[in-house]
Image (tube, coloured by chain):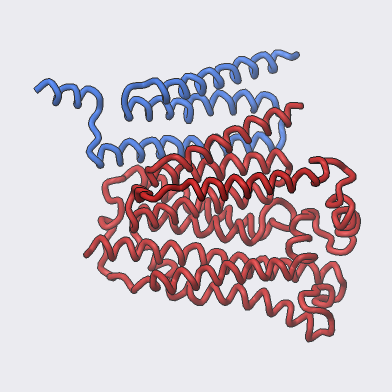
Chain colours: A blue, B red
Amino acid sequence: MSILDYFSAILLAGGVFFSFTGAIGLFRFPDFFTRVHAASVTDTIGVILIIAGLLLQTSFDLNIIKLLLILAILLLTSPTASHALAKSARHGGLLTLAESNRSNDR
Amino acid sequence: MTEVLIDLVLLGMLAMTALRVIFLKDLFAVVMLFSIFSFVSALIFINLDAVDVAFTEAAVGAGISTVLMLGTIALTGRTEKKNSHSSILHLVVVCVTGAALIYGTMDMPPFGNADNPIHQHVAPRYIEDSPKEVGLPNIVTSVLASYRGFDTLGETVVVFAAMIGVLSLLGTARPTNKRATPESGLAKHRVLHVVAKIIIPFIILFALYVQFHGDYGPGGGFQAGVIAAAALILYALVFGASFAHRIVSPRQLEVFAPLGVLLYASVGLVGMIKGANFLDYNVLASTAAAGQHYGIIIIELGVGLTVFAAMLGLFYAFSNQVERSNVQ
């Protein structure tokens, strides 16, 4: 294994770690907004790390451009999707955990 | 080994999604699960090296049909009706049918065996002769557009007929008020506006690429039409339907859909006039290979036009109906 392979393995492992924590958070976090937060971690840092790891695995050819395009599209659309999800939940009147606790205390 | 493992995991996910779809009463969640179902089956198709099918499944099943089903839910309501009568009889019928089907598969040849009839019959001929006869690198396109051109014409007509059926049920979209402003869409979603404006040109460009590169890579008229329709549906969702109507009006769609079918069928007629069979492209140009190339490009264009018009027309019909019911 060359040194690039080691770097790639570290990046891929990091990506898998963040995707995995995102998945756990999606199940274990207490309310909707924290769950969206956890899921969007998978979309951003997880994707960046995995694609960076894959970039180191390719030789310099068309695949690099394809991977970078995938990265660009995902970085543009996934946070937008998370934003739209959270915003429409807000629009529909969903309160965050802190807010609903406060209104319960009153 | 790895592929089998991936297949098993994906099939397990597919089965779990299907079970959730059966037992959930919240139709909104069911629609989302259907979308996931389509994505998982697209992954399975990719694992089976059927990229063209996976492409279609992802574009149609996960993309457009999700939007259309959401439109239906907006019209009908979000929860399933309570089923009052007992369903023992249904269960028995379903179990008997399922058992019969499983019994039927006993006689099927083993999965993936090279001696299976499907691998012995026409497939070797397509693989060996299509580079000479049709000359396209993508054999799937050669089979779909040339060898099975008549079937594909039928499929295009089915899409067209589906559009006619839905439009005759829901009514065509009426001309909308010309005074609509950007505020009528998702006005407060500044982020969505900006991102949609960035992405929509690329979606349309990609649709054109898929349309005209279908001879060489995965893709073709069906996928391209759906992707182009998805771009306009995104535009309509973010900015409001009246803005989308200004780009492609419902009236134009009613022209495009039959035009695509006619374009397809007229290629066949030209072949007949030149003295060959219906949809025989060999006589369209001086050499057979060039004729095949022309024929396939034109019929793919016809398919793309019809699919685009049908998908967008369905969406317009649903959104128009939703708007009308919101007004009342």
Position of the C terminus of chain B by quadrant: bottom left
Estimate the x, y position of residue A62 in percent, counting from the top left.
69, 38
Estimate the x, y position of residue A95 in percent, counting from the top left.
23, 31
Q: Nearer the viewer, residue B86 or B11?
A: B86
In the rendered view, does B112 fall on the left or right side of B240?
Answer: right
Instruction: Determine whether A17 is above or below B64 in the image.
Output: above
Q: Residue at x 19, y 22 (%)?
A: A101
Q: Is residue A50 visible?
A: yes
Q: Residue at x 56, y 21 (%)?
A: A16
Q: Residue at x 47, y 29 (%)?
A: A44
Q: Nearer the viewer, residue B223 or A24?
A: A24
Instruction: Determine whether A105 is above or below B161 in the image.
Output: above
Position of the N terminus of chain B by quadrant: top right
Q: Is residue B242 visible?
A: no
Instruction: Determine whether A71 is above or below B302 in the image.
Output: above
Q: Residue at x 25, y 41 (%)?
A: A91
